[in-house]
Amino acid sequence: MSRDQYTFVNPAELYADFDPQKQHQPEPGLDAELTPKADLGEDTYRGTGRLAGRKALITGADSGIGAATAIAFAREGADVAMSYLPEEEVDASRIAGILQDAGVTVVTLPGDLKDPGYCRSLVERSVEGLGGLDIVVNNGGKQVFNEDLTTLDDQQFDDTFKTNVYAMFWITKAALPHLKPGSTIINTTSIQAYNPSETLVDYASTKATINTFTKALAQQLAPKGIRVNAVAPGPIWTPLQVSDGQPQDKLPTFGEQTPIGRAGQPAELAPAYVFLASPESSYVAGETLNVNGGSPTP
């Protein structure tokens, strides 16, 4: 029997055959070379028209959570502008093809989120290519583990904050003049904002910042009819993990510490983004929606 996101299943037994192994990729990492493959919902996400006519910009849309969200948005009827690094073209091309098969407009916009010029032009080119903009998903991120603060160099600290925090600021600020009442902004934070790992001091700090940015901006924009929310993933299997996001010796047991007992898949995140983007969440603003396998959060 075929399965979609509405199929009744035991979540602890879902992906029972998932067996991550030690492996390494250079940054930024590719879904095309990930073993085992992440489930992006290619074969399982079924749309019901919840985002028909909407126009979305998604950063980090080539792989992982961003790709799963892009697939879900397209199958729900939204046109999508995809932001990703030029080195990720092989993944982005595959995802763009899946989106096009859903019958929506797709705009591919490679570039580096650390570049403020790219971030600002990204918004303008998205508006031009899609004919407007009413959903912004700030999802692209950088995560590189480091076991000792004394060896965490200025460049990595700066790159992590620019990719995860500054880009969100640049893109959101540039997008606001284009967003009409009813529009939504969704930021990707992390369980690391609440329960930081000792090896992810810089990354966890950015995710806490994203949480606070989301809650502050939500109060500013709610009276204008624009909702700002965040999704906080737990341990999710993506190329980020194998490109120095985690020490290799932690990969075989990645996610097993959660109450559900396994790592999550990007396909399991996509419905959260769809919910926050759609009008059915009209009274939800300033919220952080945790999708983390049952780990307690504030």
Image: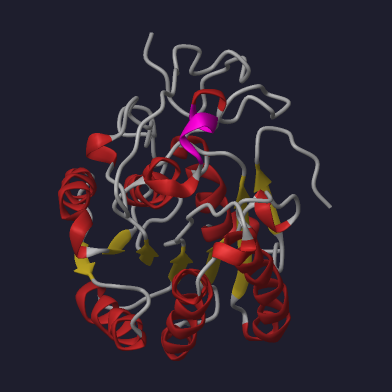
Q: Please state the horizontal and vertical placement of residue 248, each as a whole percent of the image.
A: 46, 34
**Residue stretch in magenta:** 247-251
Please determine whether, in this image, residue 273 is positioned above or below residue 57: above
| Horizontal relation, residue 276 to residue 298: left or right | left
The answer to whether one can see residue 68 in this image is: no
Q: Give the colour scheme of this rendering.
A: secondary structure
Residue at left offset 47%, top offset 48% = 245
| Horizontal relation, residue 220 to residue 252: left or right | right
| Horizontal relation, residue 197 to residue 155: left or right | right
Q: Nearer the viewer, residue 201 or 116?
A: 201
| Quadrant of the rendering where the N terminus is positioned | top left
Q: Please state the horizontal and vertical placement of residue 37, each as a whole percent of the image.
A: 32, 29
Q: Is residue 125 magenta?
A: no
Please determine whether, in this image, residue 139 is positioned above or below residue 292: below
Q: Residue furthest right?
A: 298
Q: Please state the horizontal and vertical placement of residue 235, each as a whole percent of the image.
A: 58, 39
Residue at left offset 38%, top offset 31% = 39
Q: Residue furthest front?
A: 150
Q: Nearer the viewer, residue 180 or 256?
A: 256
Residue at left offset 32%, top offset 54% = 28
Q: Nearer the viewer, residue 18 or 27?
A: 27
Q: Quadrant of residue 281?
A: bottom right
Q: Nearer the viewer, residue 170 or 243?
A: 243
| Horizontal relation, residue 32 to residue 240: left or right | left
Majority secondary structure of magenta residues: helix
The answer to whether one can see residue 174 in this image is: yes
Residue at left offset 38%, top offset 48% = 76
Q: Quadrant of residue 214?
A: bottom right
Q: Quadrant of residue 203?
A: bottom right
Q: Please state the horizontal and vertical placement of residue 227, each as a whole percent of the image.
A: 62, 72
